[in-house]
Amino acid sequence: MKKELFILGLAGCLFALPACTEGDEAEEPTAASAITLNAVVPNCSRGVATTTASIKDFVVYAFTEGSMLMNGVTVTREGGLWTYSPPAYWPVESVNFYAYSPVIKASTDISGDGGGHIPGYLNNYNVDLLYAVRKDVMQQAAPVSLNFRHALSNVRMVLSSTNPRIKVLVSYISLKNVYREGSFDFPQASTLASTPDVVGSWTDLKSLSDMITFAIIGKEDRAELTPQPTDYTLNNLDCSYVIPQPLTDVQLSTNGYSGTYIEVDCEIFDTATGIKLWPNAKTPDYMLVPETETGRIVYPATSDQVKAYLPGHAYIYNIRINNPDVLDMIEFDVSVDDYTVDQI
């Protein structure tokens, strides 16, 4: 993992379509032919983000000259085909398509003229919300290709310890004070591979909460850090999706911590003797986890380069815990991985 910080978006991802594209010569469409659909999704280089290969379903709305043609129709994958019922048929006029995935229990406000809006989306931190827009599509024989983009930010915690003299046991990791609820606005143009700057936006952010990425049931479940960086957002709670939002610097006052920050609850032992080094009698109260034997390390989620989480970006926090006293600032660096592309 490079120590520099990279901010790379997925908006410029390119996709190879399984059917002929708009620039290819297509079969002459017949009258009253049914609309068929196809979905392509950016692939994520880490974790369990939805990809073209793994997307299972999506909801689509379609309008022609302001009239509803498809009203929240669920489209599902059956083998290599996307199917829905009842079928919708091509009109003479062009069609605008708005889609999101997966099928979620959310109210929508999508119209043919005003675009799309998902008000009051409640984020559970473990769903990779996707969206796609395709406008002004005329009747065609090939499936309508919907190029999905990630609506959320992906935040990951990668921990390690390279000090052979200590053993670090982690019991809890969380991202503190992030907005869990917001309203999503679809872009007003098509989300094509050739239009990377066409992205949706979030408004009405509310409901500050914590995204817990790792938690144990008993002491035997504590994770021992190794020199090899390990992603602790995987294979536990699988929570890593955050509504894009501005971040605030962490502050410590008599009322505790405020701002956007990361908590790591852990214990540190001497490797040779097994003696517990931290927390100890000298550890300040604000670094102790009440009613436990663990200490709490807190450090900012922000940096000079990262002041906000952006849609479609993956933020990888590399946290190294090497100081047995934990009296100095914890050593850490932040990098951002770009999404890769699943070619089909």
Image (cartoon, grey):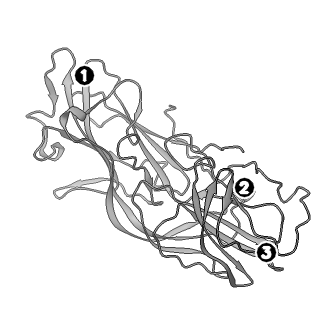
Say above or below: 225 vs 96: above
CB contact under 8 Å: marks 1 and 2: no
The 10 Å Cα crowd at callout 3, few under 14, some 14 to 19, many 20 or more, is many
| Image position of 173 (left or right of 276) | right
Give the Cα distance between marks 3 and 1. Answer: 67 Å
Q: Earlier in the sequence, mark 3 or mark 1?
A: 3
Three-letter amino acid code at the position of disc 3: Trp
Say above or below: 246 vs 111: above
Closer to the observer: label 2 or label 3? 3
Say above or below: 59 vs 309: below
> What residue did someone put label 2 on?
193
> What residue did someone put label 3 on?
90
> What residue did someone put label 1 on?
166
The 10 Å Cα crowd at callout 1, few under 14, some 14 to 19, many 20 or more, is many
Closer to us: 53 or 239: 53
| Image position of 48 (left or right of 247) | right
For the view shown, which residue lies furthest in the left direction? 281
Say above or below: 160 vs 7: above
Three-letter amino acid code at the position of disc 2: Ala
Q: Quadrant of residue 215?
A: top left
Q: Quadrant of the C terminus?
A: top right
Give the Cα distance between marks 2 and 3. Answer: 24 Å
Q: Secondary structure at mark 3?
A: loop
CB contact under 8 Å: marks 3 and 1: no
Closer to us: 215 or 169: 215
Q: Residue 85, percent across and down?
A: 64, 70
Q: Quadrant of residue 140?
A: bottom right
Give the Cα distance between marks 1 and 2. Answer: 49 Å
Q: Earlier in the sequence, mark 2 or mark 3?
A: 3
